[in-house]
Amino acid sequence: MNLLGPFEALTAEPFETSWRSPSNIAFVKYWGKKGHQLPANPSLSMTLKNCFTETRLSFSVGTSHPGVELFLNGLRQEKFAAKIEAYLRSLESLSWLAKVHVRIDTHNTFPHGTGIASSASGLSAFALGLTDYLFHLSGVKVDFFRTASYLSRLASGSASRSVYGGFVSWGDESDFYASSIPVHPELAHLRDSVLVVSGDEKTVSSTAGHGRMSEHPYASARFAQARTNYHRTRAALTAGDLSEVGAVLESEALSLHAMMLTAPSAFTLLKPKTLAAIDMIWAFRRETQLPLYFTLDAGPNLHLIYPESSQHKIRTFISHELAPLAESVIDDECGEGPVKC
């Protein structure tokens, strides 16, 4: 599928736009690829509100130096600029972009490269700005967010889900872009307290981790498990069954990290304090019967998922018992998606 047909023969002109795009936390994980940036299994995520990237794009033409300049928190980033430039070159049907200069000014509200999906928020914010530019030049009026999801997916699979608010799936309706999914009203406002055990950048990138699944001895079993968990989670979200959602959340998190531990050239992104916090969460849930669950992306930092109705007692536990294990705690919740700013 190619959604870029309407944009293949445009005439570039100067343009500026700014987008704020959120991170997301995957309830069912995407870990392993097929083809060109296509998922080996469907995934499902909750879009966040307070963990976001804000990005300003300035497009100019007729310059002697077409390409990309990128500034993160005001500091020039050559490595990230090269990645964005390579991404733009990969959009072969939009060859006219090779003559455009793009300046990117971006910042996050959370630590970069620590497993809180900064690639999802950062690359979706860029893709939304690029989509805005394409629609401005072409006059196209429909499917803005589907196009943004398609472009985001080509940069980072998880970014395809960040262009929508609420709960989002990718790899079920389509492998090429993500889609919003309905959930029971009681689960539409879940909370997520992010326990930042370590703000250090990951020792193994998600891209490298995905690559190791191609030769993983348990890959086929993992993909089958994820497909089953995807359908379990969608059914539970529709029914409002948080205990079933929570069971999948924790199973998916541990399975993801088990794949790292058993991969060719095995590695771990977990920290001792990550495991200590998991033990404390399990003990708290046994003792109180309160619906507090955890999940992890590809990093050591725990996402603590719980309902709005139980937030007072649970946040007291987090602040008194879990916070001492962490560098910081980011209080977040289900969000409504990106905004132009």
Image (spheres, helix red, strand yellow):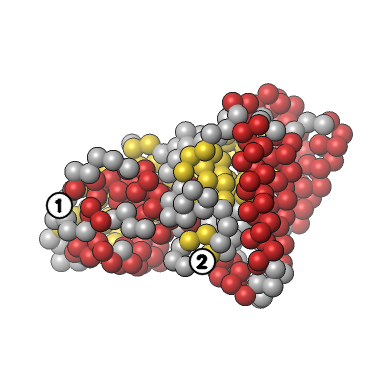
The residue nearer to you, when weighing 265 against 74, is 265
Residue bearing the label numbered 2: 34
Residue 181, position in %: x, y? Answer: 52, 38
Give the image location of residue 24, x and y in percent: 53, 45
- Which quadrant holds residue 340? top left
Sequence order check: which comes first, mark 2 or mark 1?
A: 1
Residue type at numbered disc 1: Glu
157 with respect to 220 (left or right): left
Label 1: which secondary element:
loop
Residue visible at 39% across and 53% down?
150
Residue 261 lies, in percent from the top left, at 71, 67
Q: On screen, 80 above or below 49?
A: below
Q: Residue at x 25, y 56 (%)?
A: 5
Tell me the residue that label 1 is attached to: 13
Query: Residue drawn 21% across and 59% down?
Result: 8
Query: Looking at the image, how many numbered discs can be counted on the residues?
Result: 2
Q: Is residue 181 left or right of residue 17?
A: right
Say which residue appears at 61% left-offset and 41% top-offset.
Answer: 234
